[in-house]
Image (spheres, coloured by chain):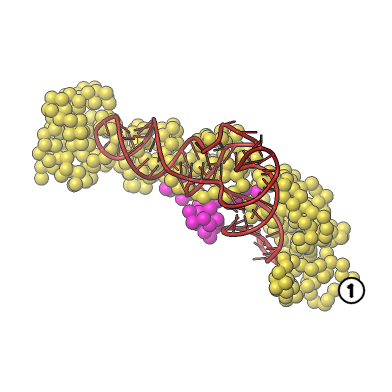
Chain colours: A yellow, B red
RNA sequence: GCUCCCUUCGUCUAGUGGCCCAGGACGUCGCCCUCUCACGGCGAAAACAGGGGUUCGAACCCCCUAGGGAGCGCCA
């Protein structure tokens, strides 16, 4: 979360430290009669459930101990159950789905404290929400069914329930929900795979939510424009290709110095010293149109920092043969004379060398490219030489000439 | 089984009764640009789950069916 730049405003709070408070509320509910002790054994409950399932009914507690008058059985530590209303319905206006209604008759008396006295989840969250004055509960739609019980609990405590918004969960490529045990990965994996936090955020915010046809959002736009009412109701599938596209988009539009900061660890990962070469921001500008991730960018940047360069022999054979070396030597001579080492000047020199020698641009650019990068792929050759600097460029050309001769 | 939720191109989505024989984006395919790889530009194929209603008119409203998901714990 910190990597994403998402920080909590308060907390965290630990429920284990609030046990006294939960106990206090339970005691109050017991005294008020909104909760009661239940002495039913697990065996009885299991049998009951089996019976109801067999009768094609929804399994639920039958309320045996609800109005128990006889003395409780010896040696049994009871659980505490909430006395849920028996009739009427619970209706709430879900902020993403609209009106949802449940019959109270469908709900049973849920356990709020176990026989060892510890409170249960549905109860603790309700007490926490009430104590902390929570106004909006936004959670996965797997909690829709818990909502009416929690609202009843809240009301019995004399608290007005908060607004609820149930958002759909995200599906993996196989159509199954992403979960801890199924397909989900931590956000830090995206960092390691070379994604920018804003790209991930942008992708995620658009998954299940939209603002017209807008695809690209800055952090501030997300905050300003996000609206629960525009959240889609159906679950959506995670699409890695679109994430990749968005990542490149942010790579291309973000401040190069900022991107450079994110690129450093990936270079280090490759064993490259980010400070032992050309200006990083410049490298970013040269590579951002040809990199979908920072990992790709680091790989593409590698040769800028590698001395001697690692030659791709297939490229050497293809571009530094007799003809290629001739072109390379011509370029070497002209470049050596060049006093002003700028992209424009380098470009002009290469063009005139090509014209003089009767070569097409490619016939001179490729030998040069292999000479300085070791491979047949790099940013535009004029830009590459400029970034590399005069000394390194000339040195590499000389080394390549020697290398290809043997 | 019962209850609740969901259903527009392969994917993310626009669309809230006429502007829709359905628009955008990713991906795919073709063309252009080009010193490599890319970026970019242009273009194409591609969807309202099915069936009934309501209405002059339905992707939008209602019902049913099918399919998907969740919940039904002394788990969270």
> Measured from the top left, where is residue A34 in percent x and y?
84, 59
Residue A57 picture quarter? bottom right
Residue ID at (78%, 72%): A40
Image mark 1: chain: A
Residue ID at (46%, 50%): A189
**Element on which disc 1 rests:** loop
- In the rendered view, tell whether residue A41 sits above or below residue A308: below
- Does the magenta segment cover residue A40? no
Q: Nearer the viewer, residue B2 or A244?
A: B2
Range of the magenta residues? A165-193
Residue A350 picture quarter? top left
Horizontal side, residue A292 vs residue B70: left or right: left
Provide the major secondary structure of the magenta segment: loop
Residue ID at (20%, 30%): A361
Q: Which residue is mark 1?
A: A70
Residue A68 picture quarter? bottom right
The quadrant of the rendering that contains the C terminus of chain A is top left
- In the rendered view, tell whether residue A313 sits above or below residue B57: below
> Measured from the top left, where is residue B11 in percent x and y?
50, 48
- Residue A73 showing in the rendered view: yes
């Amino acid at each position: 979360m910190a990597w994403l730049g998402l920080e909590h405003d308060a907390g965290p709070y630990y429920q284990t430290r609030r046990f006294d408070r939960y106990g206090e509320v339970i005691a109050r509910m017991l005294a008020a009669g909104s909760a009661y002790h239940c002495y039913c054994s697990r065996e009885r409950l299991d049998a009951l459930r089996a019976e109801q399932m067999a009768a094609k009914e929804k399994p639920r507690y039958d309320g045996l101990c609800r109005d128990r008058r006889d003395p409780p059985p010896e040696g049994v530590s009871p659980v505490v159950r909430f006395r849920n209303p028996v009739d009427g319905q619970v209706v709430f206006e879900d902020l993403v789905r609209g009106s949802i209604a449940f019959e109270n008759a469908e709900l049973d008396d849920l356990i709020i404290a176990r026989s060892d006295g510890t409170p249960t989840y549905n109860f603790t969250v309700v007490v926490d929400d009430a104590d902390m004055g929570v106004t909006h509960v936004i959670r996965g739609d797997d909690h829709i069914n818990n909502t009416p019980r929690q609202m009843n609990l809240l009301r019995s405590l004399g608290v007005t329930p908060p607004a609820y918004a149930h958002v759909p969960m995200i599906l993996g490529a196989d159509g199954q929900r992403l979960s801890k045990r199924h397909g989900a990965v931590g956000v830090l994996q995206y960092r390691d795979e070379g994604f920018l936090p804003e790209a991930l955020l942008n992708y995620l915010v658009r998954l299940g939510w939209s603002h017209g046809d807008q695809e690209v959002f800055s952090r501030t736009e997300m905050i300003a424009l996000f609206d629960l009412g525009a959240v889609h109701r159906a679950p959506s599938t995670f699409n890695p290709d679109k994430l990749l596209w968005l990542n490149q988009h942010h790579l291309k539009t973000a401040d190069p110095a900022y991107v450079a900061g994110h690129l450093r660890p990936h270079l280090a990962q490759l064993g490259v010293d980010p400070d032992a070469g050309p200006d990083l921001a410049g490298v970013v500008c040269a590579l951002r149109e040809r990199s979908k991730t920072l990992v790709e960018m680091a790989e593409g940047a590698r040769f800028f920092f590698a001395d001697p360069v690692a030659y791709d022999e297939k490229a050497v054979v293809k571009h530094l043969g007799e003809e290629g070396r001739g072109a390379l030597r011509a370029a070497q001579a002209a470049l050596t004379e060049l006093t002003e080492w700028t992209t424009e000047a380098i470009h002009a020199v290469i063009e005139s060398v090509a014209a003089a020698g009767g070569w097409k641009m490619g016939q001179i650019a490729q030998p040069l490219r292999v000479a300085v990068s070791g491979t047949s792929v790099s940013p535009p050759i004029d830009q590459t030489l400029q970034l590399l600097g005069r000394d390194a460029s000339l040195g590499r050309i000389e080394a390549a000439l020697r290398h290809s001769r043997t």
